[in-house]
C-alpha cells in the first residue's frame, strides 16, 4: 500500500510539474508578445517625437532667419534715411557755399 501511495504521489507531482511547465511556457509567450508590442509602440512614439523636434527646430531656424532679414532691412532702411539726410545737408551746404562765393564776386 505504501508503494501504491508513493506512486500516486509521484504521478501527482509529475502532473503538477507538467502543469507548472505549461503555465510557464504560456506566461513566457505572453510576456514576449507584450514586450514586442510595447517595443513597436515605443519606436513609433520616438519617431513622432523626433519628427516634432525637427519641425520645431526648422520653425525656429526660419523665425530667426526672418528676424535677421527684418533687422537687416531695418538697418538698411535707416542707413538709407541717414544717407539721404546727409546728401540733403551737403546739397544745402553746397548751395550756401555757392551763394557765398557769388556774393563775394
Image (tube, rainbow, N blue to C red):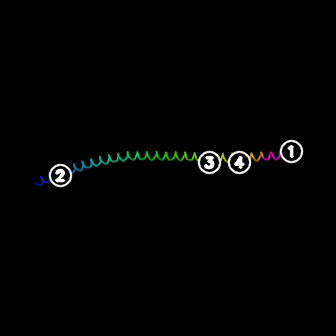
Q: Earlier in the sequence, mark 1 or mark 4?
A: 4
Secondary structure at badge 1 equals helix
Secondary structure at badge 2 equals helix
Which residue is label 1 attached to? 102
**Mark 1 → mark 4, Cα distance in angstroms:** 30 Å
**Tag on residue 12?**
2
Q: Quadrant of the C terminus?
A: top right
**Mark 1 → mark 3, Cα distance in angstroms:** 46 Å
**Mark 4 → mark 2, Cα distance in angstroms:** 103 Å
Q: Earlier in the sequence, mark 4 or mark 2?
A: 2
**Residue 79 x, y percent position in the rendering:** 68, 47
Q: How many marks?
A: 4
Q: Are marks 3 and 2 in contact (CB under 8 Å)?
A: no
Q: Are marks 1 and 4 in contact (CB under 8 Å)?
A: no
Q: Earlier in the sequence, mark 4 or mark 3?
A: 3
**Residue 55 x, y percent position in the rendering:** 49, 45
**Tag on residue 5?**
none
Which residue is label 3 attached to? 71
32 in the magenta segment: no
Q: Is residue 104 left or right of residue 56?
A: right
Secondary structure at badge 4 equals helix
**Mark 3 → mark 2, Cα distance in angstroms:** 87 Å
**Residue 62 x, y percent position in the rendering:** 55, 45
Magenta: main secondary structure = helix
**Tag on residue 82?**
4
User: Mark 4 against mark 2, which lies toward the viewer?
Assistant: 4
Q: Is residue 28 left or right of residue 11?
A: right
Q: Earlier in the sequence, mark 3 or mark 2?
A: 2
**Mark 1 → mark 2, Cα distance in angstroms:** 133 Å
Amino acid at each position: 500500500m505504501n508503494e501504491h501511495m508513493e506512486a500516486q504521489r509521484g504521478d501527482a507531482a509529475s502532473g503538477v510539474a507538467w502543469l507548472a511547465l505549461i503555465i510557464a511556457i504560456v506566461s513566457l509567450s505572453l510576456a514576449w508578445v507584450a514586450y514586442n508590442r510595447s517595443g513597436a509602440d515605443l519606436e513609433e512614439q520616438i519617431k513622432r517625437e523626433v519628427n516634432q523636434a525637427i519641425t520645431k527646430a526648422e520653425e525656429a531656424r526660419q523665425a530667426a532667419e526672418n528676424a535677421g532679414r527684418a533687422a537687416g532691412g531695418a538697418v538698411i532702411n535707416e542707413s538709407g534715411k541717414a544717407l539721404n539726410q546727409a546728401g540733403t545737408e551737403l546739397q544745402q551746404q553746397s548751395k550756401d557755399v555757392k551763394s557765398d562765393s557769388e556774393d563775394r564776386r
